[in-house]
Amino acid sequence: NAGVTQTPKFRVLKTGQSMTLLCAQDMNHEYMYWYRQDPGMGLRLIHYSVGEGTTAKGEVPDGYNVSRLKKQNFLLGLESAAPSQTSVYFCATSRGAGEQFFGPGTRLTVL
Amino acid sequence: GENVEQHPSTLSVQEGDSAVIKCTYSDSASNYFPWYKQELGKRPQLIIDIRSNVGEKKDQRIAVTLNKTAKHFSLHITETQPEDSAVYFCGGDSGGSNYKLTFGKGTLLTVNP
């Protein structure tokens, strides 16, 4: 079992470019989350999903969109990247209340 | 929503000493409090968690205590080893939506040999 995987691992964008980060899980978990991690700021929730076809805003949703068309995939989109979106992005999954399982992370730099 | 404060932001101890990291939370309806360890360049991984119906939980050298009245919980690591060096995050759920976690800003623990 791969668990939780993220694609890509690294990416460099120019300001204004767009991209999509993919999170895939084979754990059959209903809940999926996107976090960003910045130095000294901990893990902040961007968007989350409680099931296929549903999404909701987290703590820092501005500038991001998400989709959950399939249960096993959760996509995070940046329509027009800004330097403030330079960060490490983590996807996580859970069955519900309880342990969240994190992916390996995507390091994004916006120039 | 939930607000989780974590202290200290950095902690340096000698190998064999104990380390304590403290967190406070704001939402009195919160029920679930996990602790994650993140080694440099790696993903966060759960090391221990506690639910509101329990005051203390131990797993070998690590323990977590919870004081619901005061709305704080702590991570205790005894007999620290160099491999305990990492960033530790505490978390708290939003009581009404207990699948959603709010994390503290993290504590960088350094264990000196």
Image (spheres, coloured by chain):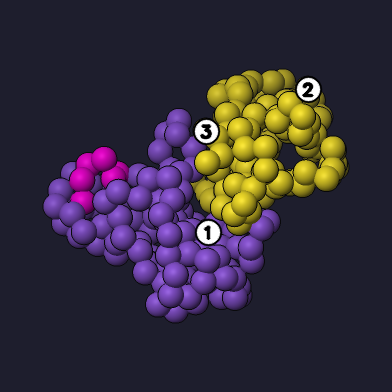
Q: Is mark 3 on a helix, strand or loop?
A: loop
Identify the residue at image location x=62%, y=38%.
B27
Can I make out residue A4 in this image?
no
Q: Dot 2 falls on which chain? A: B
Q: What element carries label 2?
A: loop
- Chain the render paints purple: A
The residue positioned farthest toward the bottom in the image shown = A70
Q: Give the range drawn in magenta.
A: A81-86
Question: Comparing marks 3 and 2, which lies closer to the viewer?
Answer: 3
Mark 1 chain: A
Residue B65 visible from this viewpoint: yes
Question: Which picture quadrant has residue B62?
Answer: top right
Compare residues A30 and B86 and report the one nearer the observer. Answer: A30
Q: Position of residue B76 (x, y in %)?
A: 77, 31
Q: Tag 1's secondary structure? A: strand
What residue did someone put label 1 on?
A92
Instruction: Name the spot of residue B66 as percent of width and height, x first.
Output: 78, 34
Residue that carries the numbered disc 2 in the rendered image: B17
Q: Look at mark 3 in the image and give the residue it sits on.
A: B105
Position of residue A43 relative to residue B65, above or below, is: below
Say above or below: B101 vs A67: above
Tell me, yes or no, whether the highlighted magenta stretch contains residue A85. yes
What colour do you see for chain B? yellow
